[in-house]
Every structure is written in structure tokens, then in C-alpha cells.
């Protein structure tokens, strides 16, 4: 059963010990008309990543989904994902972790100078709406908080491992939600804020698009949140709105 989490956040937080996926509960709340509600769980038994991938979510993490009804067009929705990445990264940095952002939606910790990293958090945005307006949008955020990386998929890291101590999850969630609220209130400021925290810019990357792979240097992120890559093949700058991005060795 859901209980009040008792945060003075700009959102009503509904807490569960365990759920399948907070994004699934958030979808139910959204279709019931809710706004500015957060579904938070200690454990997810069916956590999901993008493209139907699994998201490992044992007890001790921060697994949450924010339900919003923003007055924006669907074209601006990716800015909400970037806003969540900025908010999560800032909250993790306050917890003592050298968190950075990998385009578009991973919060990572660098392990060397060449763009290698471990994954601290992931973000999954889902929405419903028409071509000219968003009806609702849910932002799922999964943070490996008070966990050992040992029990997680390869390439993962946790706040416990990076900071050397557990984080007070109530404080962490409060900071994350305050940051998210501030960043979304100034959507034009999202991309500049994202750039400051980006690990991907300046990296040699491969982006897998539906039209094929693109390899080159990640040189910028556009006003709408798309990645701008200077292609090694054509020498031209190409813009990728969505896709998987891998950091390559220089
Ligand atoms: P993604 O598709 O970018 O990443 C998924 C991949 O990450 C998996 O295939 C696996 O390799 C790896 N992985 C799985 N679990 C973890 C983990 N705990 N830490 C690091 N790496 C992992 C990223 O998807 C989006 C994830 C969003 C998760 C939140 S949690 C709250 C909400 N509810 C829900 O079901 N999903 C979101």
C-alpha cells in the first residue's frame, strides 16, 4: 500500500516498499488525471529501461517516476529528459559523487580521461498526447543509491561505492525533486545546464540511428536536445534526435 513519504517537495510523493515498475504505476496515475505526483519505491520487481531492456532495481536504490502535465509540444518533451538528467546529476554531486551526463539520459561516473564510465542512474520518459500538445508525461529515474555495484549488471556503480557511504534517501529525493522543479521552470536554460555537466561533448562517439551508425566527435547539443556529431566519414555535422550513444576510444 502507498504511504505519504512526508517530503516538503514541490510534488506529492507516494511511497511503496515494492512495485513492479514505478513507471507503470505513474502511467495509471497519469491516465487518472494526476499531476505533479511522484511514485517512489524501495524495490522494483519489473524495472524497465529503454527498448524493453531490464533495469535492475533491488531494495536500497531510488526508483521513482514523476507524473507531469506540462504545457508543451511533444517536440519539447526531450527537454524534460535532459532536465531530469541535470537534476539527478546535481543531487548525486551533492552526495559526494563525481557524476556527469552521457547523452541523452545516463548519469555516469568517469573512470579515465578517455570517456570510459560507470553507470549510476538511468532515465526513461514516456508520454501521451497529440501532435501539438502533451497530455501527460512521466519521467522515470533510477539511481543506484545504497547498493553494492557487485550485485548489479557490469558497468554499474552506486552512490555507496563512489561516495564511500550511504546517502540519506529522503534528503537525496528532496534535492532531486527541487532541482527538477527549478530546471523545468526554465526550459530554455536546460541545454546550457546540461552542457556544463556533459561527459559526452568532445568525445569520439558512435550513435546508432535507424538509418545506420554514425561515428565522429560529439561537438554540441542543439536547443532541442539533439546531439550534433561531426562525422568522420563525411566531415559534416549531423544532428541525431534520439538513439544509443557509445563513447569510443580516441
Ligand atoms: P537503458 O535502456 O539506457 O539501460 C538499460 C541497461 O542498463 C540494461 O540493459 C543493463 O545493461 C544496464 N542496467 C540495468 N540495470 C542497471 C542498473 N541498476 N545500473 C546500471 N546499469 C543497469 C535506462 O535504460 C533507463 C532506466 C530507467 C529506470 C527507472 S527506475 C524508475 C522507473 N521505473 C522503471 O521501470 N524504469 C524507470
Image (cartoon, rainbow, N blue to C red):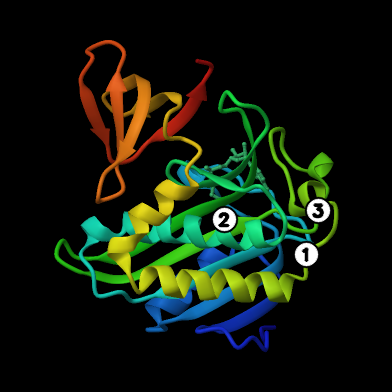
SS for callout 3: helix
Image x and y of residue 223, in percent: 25, 50
Image x and y of residue 162, in percent: 77, 47
- Whether tag 1 and tag 3 are in contact, CB under 8 A, the answer is yes
Residue at image mark 3: 160
Residue at image mark 1: 167
**226 relative to 24, above or below:** above
Quarter assignment of residue 153: top right
- Whether tag 2 and tag 1 are in contact, CB under 8 A, the answer is no
SS for callout 2: helix
Residue at image mark 2: 89
What residue is at 48 percent from the left and 54 percent from the top?
124
Label 1 and label 3: CA atoms lie apart by 7 Å
Report if the beta carbon of the residue with label 1 is closer than 8 angstroms to ligand 1: no
The earlier-in-sequence mark between 1 and 3 is: 3
Q: Nearer the viewer, residue 200 or 169?
A: 200
What is the crowding at mark 2: few (fewer than 14 residues within 10 Å), some, or many (at least 20)? many
What residue is at 61 percent from the left and 63 percent from the top?
91
Label 2 and label 1: CA atoms lie apart by 14 Å
What residue is at 48 percent from the left and 57 percent from the top?
86
What residue is at 57 percent from the left and 55 percent from the top?
89
Point out the image quarter for the N terminus. Answer: bottom right
In this rendering, position of residue 149 left or right of residue 242:
right
SS for callout 1: loop
In this rendering, position of residue 106 left or right of residue 131:
right
Amino acid at each position: 500500500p502507498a504511504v505519504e513519504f512526508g517530503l516538503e517537495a514541490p510534488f506529492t510523493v507516494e511511497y511503496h516498499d515494492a512495485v513492479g515498475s514505478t513507471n507503470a504505476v505513474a502511467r495509471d496515475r497519469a491516465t487518472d488525471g494526476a499531476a505533479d505526483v511522484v511514485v517512489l519505491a524501495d524495490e522494483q520487481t519489473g524495472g524497465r529501461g529503454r527498448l524493453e531492456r531490464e533495469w535492475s532495481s533491488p531494495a536500497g536504490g531510488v526508483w521513482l517516476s514523476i507524473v507531469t502535465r506540462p504545457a508543451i509540444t511533444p517536440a519539447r518533451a526531450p527537454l524534460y529528459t535532459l532536465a531530469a538528467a541535470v537534476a539527478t546529476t546535481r543531487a548525486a554531486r551533492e552526495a559526494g559523487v563525481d557524476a556527469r551526463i552521457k547523452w541523452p539520459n545516463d548519469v555516469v561516473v568517469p573512470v579515465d580521461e578517455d570517456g570510459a564510465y560507470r553507470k549510476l542512474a538511468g532515465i526513461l520518459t514516456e508520454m501521451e498526447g497529440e501532435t501539438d500538445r502533451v497530455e501527460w508525461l512521466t519521467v522515470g529515474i533510477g539511481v543506484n543509491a545504497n547498493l553494492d555495484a557487485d550485485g548489479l549488471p557490469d558497468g554499474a556503480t552506486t552512490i555507496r561505492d563512489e561516495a564511500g557511504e550511504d546517502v540519506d534517501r529522503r534528503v537525496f529525493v528532496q534535492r532531486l525533486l527541487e532541482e527538477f522543479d527549478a530546471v523545468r521552470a526554465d526550459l530554455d536554460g536546460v541545454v546550457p545546464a546540461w552542457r556544463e555537466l556533459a561527459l559526452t561533448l568532445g568525445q569520439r562517439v558512435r550513435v546508432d540511428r535507424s538509418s545506420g551508425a554514425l561515428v565522429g566527435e560529439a561537438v554540441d547539443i542543439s536547443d532541442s536536445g539533439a546531439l550534433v556529431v561531426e562525422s568522420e566519414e563525411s566531415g559534416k555535422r549531423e544532428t541525431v534526435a534520439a538513439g544509443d550513444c557509445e563513447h569510443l576510444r580516441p
